[in-house]
Amino acid sequence: MRIRFLHTADIHLGKTYRTSPGEAARYEDFFRMLGGIVADAVRERVDFVLIGGDLFHTGQILPKTFARTIETLQLLKDNRIPCIAVEGNHDWIHRRDSISWMEALSQMGYIRLLRPSRTETGGYRFDPFDPETGMGGRIEIEGLNIYGLGYIGAQAGAHVARICEAVETRNNLLLFHVGVWTYSPVEIGNIKPEEALPLAECFDYVALGHGHKPYIIKTPDGRPYAFNPGSPERVNFGEERYDKGYYLVTVMDGRYSHESRPTTPRPMLGPGRLPPLRTGAGAAPPGAGGDLPPAARGDQEPPVARDPQRGRGNGQKEPRRDRAGGAVGADRRQERVQGERGRAGAALADDPRCGPQG
Ligand SMILES: [Mn+2]
């Protein structure tokens, strides 16, 4: 039995560069990028699409962002390709008295939002997904059991044993919004490689999201088991330094093979004009583009030439200097606030910025 799926993450729909004339074009870039991935899914006739969290840039989104999201995901729904998603630290909503946008999308059948429930003793429970309520912790497609876990906070490493204890099936995949240190450049929401390793015992493929840079984690004996596609767009400055894309994964008789599908986000180089888009996933419709002043692109740092030899998601450790593009103290504090779930909802609703590369 052959199963094929696309694995992407960190789409960050609704990201804006406020008060800049180029805002409308940049806002649209993120939908165009997701639209390109959706079109690829339909063209490749995949069995499902995985989104590893941060579909939205903020927990509270504008009505137009929700409308554009539905419009973009409509093609998957029309083609009956399930879009399975978890919540990242960016689209997680604090208030439990109102339904989140992610829950709404799930109830409307645009995504299947996976979120485990917790037992009284602190354990995890992955109930089968119920299309009626749009809720559940796992879903079975063609004999593959897909478990979903969104952003669970800074102490995620301490939860790995409890997560594995809750797995009762074979042939398992885990969709998880977490970074693996030191591969992930995000400062918060990481687990250490040795903490992540037990996941390789109960899941054949761990589909990550969170770090915007691609990487692959292997077991000590060299088996790749955790895959982070990175953001297909350039969400923050500094992300022009590495290749962008998502994965097309094939499962044949329980064996996984995967292929990187490169995307071509708008270049962030050069002052003056808004650079044009190239073709491919995320290609520009006719008439897109226009002038974008330096402030809109946040040219606080000099343009950086891309080096094609770096950041290809080959699982190799990257030097720390790549992280956050030289984040300063204020940015780090901001990131810390956003990373703490208790306060994230309010902080993110008011602030269009994103923590460095998360
Ligand atoms: Mn993100």
Image (cartoon, rainbow, N blue to C red):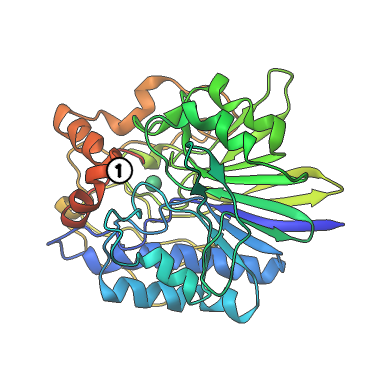
Residue 237 appears in which quarter of the rendering?
Answer: top left
Left or right of residue 32: residue 326: left
Left or right of residue 322: residue 116: right
Query: Which residue carries the number 1 mark?
Result: 341
For residue 304, above or below residue 127: above
- Residue 302 visible from this viewpoint: no
For residue 19, above or below residue 314: below
Position of residue 156 measured from the top left corner of the image (x, y, whole percent): 45, 32
Q: Indicate the secondary structure of the residue bearing disc 1.
A: helix
Could you classify mark 1 by the number of other residues whose Cα lies within 10 Å: few (under 14), some (14-19), or many (20 or more)? some
Position of residue 258 measured from the top left corner of the image (x, y, whole percent): 70, 45
Residue visible at 51% across and 36% down? Answer: 308
- Quadrant in the picture for the N terminus: bottom right
Viewer-side residue, 136 vs 340: 136
Residue visible at 67% across and 34% down? Answer: 225
Q: Residue furthest front?
A: 120
Viewer-side residue, 144 vs 255: 144
Residue visible at 67% across and 46% down? Answer: 173
Residue visible at 63% across and 32% down? Answer: 199
For residue 184, above or below residue 111: above
Question: Which amino acid type is marked by label 1?
Answer: Arg
Viewer-side residue, 240 vs 255: 255
- Quadrant in the picture for the C terminus: top left
